[in-house]
Amino acid sequence: MMLGGGGSSQPIMVLNANTKRDQGKKAQFSNIFAAKTIADTIRTCLGPRAMLKMVLDPMGGIVLTNDGNAILREIQVQHPAGKSMIEISRTQDEEVGDGTTSVIILAGELLAQTEQYLQQGLHATVVIRAYRKALEDCIDIMKTKASIAIDIKNRDEMLRVVKSCIGTKYLSRWSDLACQISLDAVQTVMIEEHGRREIDIKRYARFEKIPGGSIEDSYLLKGCMLNKDVVHPKMKRRIENPRIVLLDCSLEYKKGESQTSLEFSGEPDFTRMLQLEEESIRAMCQDVIAVKPDVVVTEKGISDVAAHYLAAAGISAVRRTKKSDNNRISRATGASIVNDTADLKEEDVGTGCGLFEIRKIGDEYYTFFDQCKNPKACTIILRGANKDVLNEIERNFQDAMNVTRNVMLEPRLTPGGGAVEMALSRALDAMSNSEGTSNDEFFKGVEKYPYKAVSRALEIIPRTLIQNCGGNVIKQLTTLRAKHSQQADQFTWGIDGETGQLVDMHKFGIWEPIAVKMQTIKTAIETAILLLRIDDIVSGTKKASTLTDGPGQGDGKKKKDDDENKPTDESNKE
């Protein structure tokens, strides 16, 4: 970048000559193009007729999925606006767990609709003001007019909601099984205390993927399962109503943390040291045996001597479990995790488990804590043909469980199949056309046109659903628009994603949690606003020498040149 300084014609260099810079309209159109490209990449992944994408990750692994977030996570993107789009998909996944594809498609379409207004000379700030107003109106309409309440105690209604989420996934063929597992898992981990409802799926609902068998063999274990075996062959491998002790300390002698050296003056000293080590282990084991447990689970190691003492006392032991697994067993069995064997008390022993059993599945041994009385943690055991299928099924289950959690935390539903988007589109359109009757000054200015653009952009969801199942887009979309325009209470009419025909979602039974839809529209509009506010993209590059010479070579060449130009002794004498 060059500026002319104070009347002189001499240019002043402000930015590095190798810096790439896009300004004004060029930067905005560049961002819009990047967003449209990302949206077009995953447009075919929406709805029950969604196509799968096969993505090769940098390590050579394969990801087979139609989940927007999973696809974009594996794609390498250079453009900064493209990276922002990928970020919103991740935000959507973390916040509500579903709608990751919809949010990208909607954000891309909102920016595409903006392009014509920027070309006509409308300022980006005017467009942003209209988008903010449209967002507020969308949230208000959705809460008051385009949603219904649901009774979360009615199991059939809840199953119908989960089924509409799974209907667009790979798991749709086994939707009845998947719905039952998802709903039971969420209800298992749900805790209600002091009028507050807490559902922590990530920590207390674990997926255990075992290749082999068929998907129908998957089931929900109301307890815990570890990929571990007992440490001693003589230990019991099946115990009914076990008393369980959970430890966070090792049952072995303490070793020095740094390098430790011992000097012995005589042979008896060495024998005495070994005796002391054995006595310390025996003391630990006596502390454990004193509370009469049947099973001991520790996060640390168990030495051979300790295993011998425990086996002799008829106690089964499992070692080196993960911290998260120990927390899950604690929630399922009622045991408390103890940090030192000397602190063990009767109330720390868990008695909530009905059956402790070691089972062999394939080539691996698994430890089951089954038939728990009131488990607040669970394990979902997934079976399938191979790891790729199991990974995709796990992603589908995660979405289904997140949807169930969202409904339980905010029990309101909106119709699926593009119905709520079309209802919002018609409502926004009607509001923007009412400038003569409305007292709102907003619609009397130029903001009215970008406001209408939001109503057009919302139609992208029903349009994409029709396109993905090969329907007649113009005919079906026009008919759907007419249906919603006739009566305000017709907000449940949408698209059957299987056939592309118009159906009443109330009768068809496709409902989505309001939390997912609201998050989708909020995130999409706010991302469009964010990208529209950018009017300058500066990308700083490395120096020319380092670009041409490769890593580390440019510095060496510069040093060599400096050495050659350094004055020698002869030149100094002259």
Image (spheres, rainbow, N blue to C red):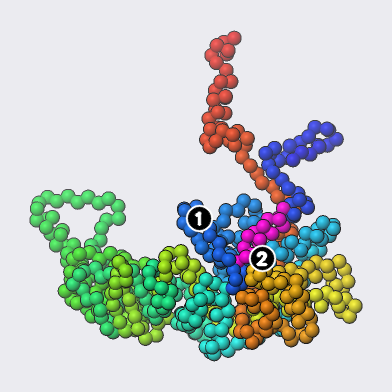
* Residue 40 part of the magenta segment: yes
Q: Secondary structure at mark 1?
A: loop
Residue 566 on image: x %, y %: 57, 20
Count residues near mark 2 (Cα–Cα under 10 Å), then give few for <14, some for 14-19, many for 20+: many
Residue 171 on image: x %, y %: 50, 73
Residue 521 shows in the view: no
**Residue at 63 percent of width and 35 percent of height:** 544
On the rendered image, what quadrant is the N terminus found in?
Answer: top right
Amino acid on which the number 2 mark rests in the picture: Ile
Residue 529 on image: x %, y %: 72, 63
**Residue at 64 percent of width and 87 percent of height:** 507
Q: Does residue 477 appear to the left or right of 95 in the view shown?
A: right
**Residue at 69 percent of width and 59 percent of height:** 36
Residue 356 shows in the view: yes
Q: Secondary structure at mark 2?
A: helix
Write down the residue under mark 2: 105
Q: What's the magenta region?
A: 30-45
Q: Is residue 573 above or below residue 168?
A: above
**Residue at 15 percent of width and 59 percent of height:** 274
**Which sits earlier in the primary sequence, circle 1 or circle 2?**
1
Measured Cα–Cα span from mark 1 to mark 2: 23 Å
Write down the residue under mark 1: 57
Between 407 and 495, which is closer to the camera in this rendering? 495
State the residue lying farthest toward the top: 574
Residue 81 on image: x %, y %: 66, 56
Between 321 and 507, which is closer to the camera in this rendering? 507
The total of numbered circles placed on residues is 2
On the rendered image, what quadrant is the C terminus found in?
Answer: top right
Q: Are marks 1 and 2 in contact (CB under 8 Å)?
A: no
Count residues near mark 1 (Cα–Cα under 10 Å), then give few for <14, some for 14-19, many for 20+: few
Residue 216, quarter of the rendered image: bottom left
Amino acid on which the number 1 mark rests in the picture: Asp
